[in-house]
Image: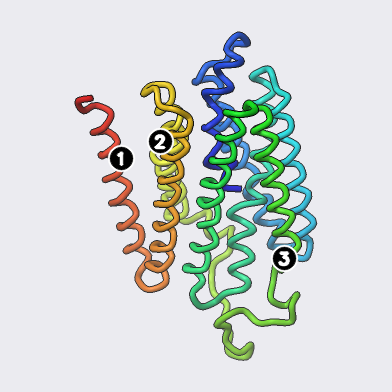
């Protein structure tokens, strides 16, 4: 799943170069990634409710969404017009929220009480490792067989990987006659929290959401542009751009683990301050490299 989130920009230059006669530019083609993210916003609440109420149907839904995602990659490989990419991205975005963060956090919240944040951070490292793996494969296929075959190959690998997940995971410990790790005896378990209806009337709920929005604009916007900038603006090869993405993903892997450990051992403010400080520092470094002397 990480490739679909992080690795699609590797295709920008190859697709635009071949289809420029059809009106493709770096700007209008990159919109296909934005449309995928935008459509995912509207499907997140649905999958959150669905997996909560129908946890026993998670595997069937997961497989169906995997098949739809694979179909969109096949569609990319046969596309010639901008609207083809836009329409397929909207579909891919709608189903992507049901394949990534929501099922991962749902399953691991069911399986772990102790060390929950650390375990979730380790699991989410998979998206970064997946990006590294898929990026190198896509780079190879783009160079040797063209971007159309590369789309198909990446989609096939993602589909087979997700099928393997479907065959091996269990949504809840009860399906395996087990107990969550670190669970208290049932007689002393205490459930706490607030309802969705209560949460949406709290100012902090909306402040948090707006903070996530600003963070995504600053960080994901940069992440989705820098590989293309390396190729188009700086004249570097697709191999160099792919390696840069790989190094970036390796750093994210380490950062995810550190964040999980911080959340498990300290107040959440420590993790937020740590990540925010590093993000600001990284953006300032990029700005220095952009506007500084060649």
Separation of marks 2 and 1 at Cα, in angstroms: 9 Å
Mark 2 near mark 1, Cβ–Cβ under 8 Å? yes
Q: Position of residue 207 (x, y in %)?
A: 41, 50
Q: In this view, does 23 lie to the left or right of 264?
A: right
Per the image, the residue denoted by label 1 is: 283
Q: Which of marks 2 and 1 is nearer the N terminus?
A: 2
> For the point 52% across and 32% down, which residue is it?
9
Q: Is residue 138 in sight in this rendering?
A: yes
Q: Position of residue 277 (x, y in %)?
A: 28, 51
Residue at image location 50% in from the left, 20% down from the top = 26
Residue at x 47%, y 56% (from the top left corner): 202
| First in sequence: mark 2 vs mark 3 | 3
Q: Mark 2 points at which residue?
A: 222
Crowdedness of circle 3 by 10 Å Cα count: few (<14), some, many (20+)? few
Scheme of image coloration: rainbow
The alpha-carbon separation of the residues under discs 3 and 1 comes to 39 Å
Q: From what the image shows, is residue 84 above or below residue 196?
A: above
**SS of the residue under disc 2:** helix
Residue found at x 40% / y 67%? 263
Please state which of residues 293 and 144 is positioned toward the viewer in this rendering. Answer: 144
Image-quadrant location for residue 19: top right
């Amino acid at each position: 799943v990480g490739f679909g989130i992080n690795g699609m920009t590797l295709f920008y230059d190859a697709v635009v170069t071949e289809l420029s006669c059809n009106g493709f530019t770096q700007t209008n083609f990159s919109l296909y990634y934005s449309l995928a993210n935008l459509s995912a916003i509207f499907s997140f609440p649905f999958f959150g409710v669905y997996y909560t109420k129908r946890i026993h149907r998670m595997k069937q839904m997961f497989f169906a969404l995997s098949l739809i995602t694979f179909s969109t990659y096949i569609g990319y490989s046969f596309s010639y017009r901008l609207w083809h990419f836009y329409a397929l991205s909207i579909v891919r975005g709608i189903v992507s929220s049901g394949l990534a963060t929501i099922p991962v956090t749902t399953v691991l919240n069911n399986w772990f009480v102790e060390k929950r944040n650390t375990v979730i951070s380790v699991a989410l490292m998979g998206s970064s490792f997946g990006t590294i793996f898929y990026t190198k494969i896509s780079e190879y296929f783009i160079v040797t067989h063209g971007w159309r075959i590369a789309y198909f190959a990446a989609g096939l690998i993602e589909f087979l990987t997700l099928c393997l997940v479907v065959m091996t995971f269990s949504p809840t410990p009860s399906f395996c006659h087990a107990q969550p790790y670190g669970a208290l005896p049932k007689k002393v378990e205490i459930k706490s929290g607030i309802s969705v209806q209560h949460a949406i009337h709290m100012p902090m709920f909306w402040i948090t959401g707006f903070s996530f929005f600003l963070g995504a604009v600053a960080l994901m916007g940069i992440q989705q542009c820098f590989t293309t900038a390396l190729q188009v603006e700086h004249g570097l090869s697709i191999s160099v751009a792919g390696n840069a993405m790989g190094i970036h993903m390796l750093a994210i892997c380490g950062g995810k683990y550190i964040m999980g450990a911080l959340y498990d051992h300290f107040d959440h403010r420590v993790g937020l301050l740590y990540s925010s400080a590093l993000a600001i520092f990284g953006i300032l470094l990029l700005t220095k490299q952009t506007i500084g002397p060649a």
